[in-house]
Amino acid sequence: MSIAENIARIREEMKKAALAAGRDPASIQLCAATKMNDAEAVRAAIAGGVDVCGENRVQELTQKLSENAYEGAPVHFIGHLQTNKVKQVVGKVALIQSVDSLRLLEAIQKEAARQSIRQEILLEVNIGAEESKSGFAPDEIPDLVNRFSEFPNLFLRGLMAIPPVSQKPGDNTKFFQKMYALTVDITTKKVDNVCVDVLSMGMSDDFADAIACGSTMIRVGTAIFGRRIYN
Ligand SMILES: *Cc1c(COP(=O)(O)O)cnc(C)c1O
């Protein structure tokens, strides 16, 4: 199967899941998780109609930006970002989805102020309370959102989550439902620098469940590009 065929199939499944949930398929974006795939594969995904590219590693982002790999689609940062690398990401991507600590939030604010720009971000929630994963605890989110008037160079667009690896359909539904409830909670807040309309959740194995629970952006790697070869 080619990348274009994979994307066409995923679009069909997205549409089915959306309609089954009474949702407009156009309200859900497809983000290609491009880690470990080269510029040529990224270009094929954009030609195949993904809405967004999501990059995990600063080094890959920098390399592919230098190759104009993302031409035709916005690029988001979706991996763990070290505070000493924010300069290489802030202002280079449309959205940083994976803001997982207050320290990182403050570092991005500082760099965005230096560049005189506004950086759009999502807060990453450690929804499965996994020790191996970074992110905010769900109960930290409401207070943090209330503090956003302190971050004039940031714009909070919503939440992102990477739940535990699912074994079978339905496994992560409870986490997706919690994320949706948390998003609804903060959507009703009127805070400066906050306008919540993105809920980024769902990957190759569980995106249909995520869409059923209100995801507005799924991040798909394997189902688009095939299995990643880790050495
Ligand atoms: C790799 C990755 C994905 C996609 O995972 P697949 O299971 O390959 O679809 C989504 N989100 C993040 C943050 C990732 O690192």
Image (cartoon, helix red, strand yellow):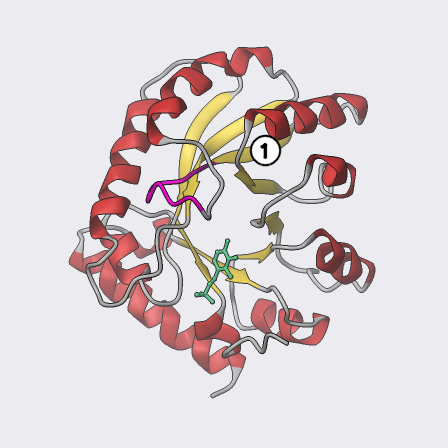
What is the quadrant of residue 105 in the picture? top right
> From the viewer's perspective, is residue 47 above or below residue 157?
below
User: Alpha-carbon neighbours of circle 1 within 10 Å: few (<14), some, or many (≥20)?
Assistant: many
Residue 229: percent from left, percent from top? 58, 78
Residue 100: percent from left, percent from top? 52, 35
Residue 41: percent from left, percent from top? 64, 75
> From the viewer's perspective, is residue 135 above or below residue 193?
below
The residue identified by callout 1 is: 120
Q: Does dot 1 land on a helix, a strand or a loop?
A: strand
Residue at image coords 57%, 71%: 45
Q: Which residues are magenta?
A: 124-131
What is the quadrant of residue 34 in the picture? bottom right
2 falls in the magenta region? no
The amino acid marked with disc number 1 is Glu
Residue at image coords 64%, 71%: 37
Residue at image coords 56%, 49%: 78
Q: Is residue 91 left or right of residue 28?
A: right
Residue 103: percent from left, percent from top? 62, 26
Tally of numbered tags:
1
125 falls in the magenta region? yes
Q: Is residue 5 left or right of residue 216?
A: right
Residue at image coords 31%, 20%: 188
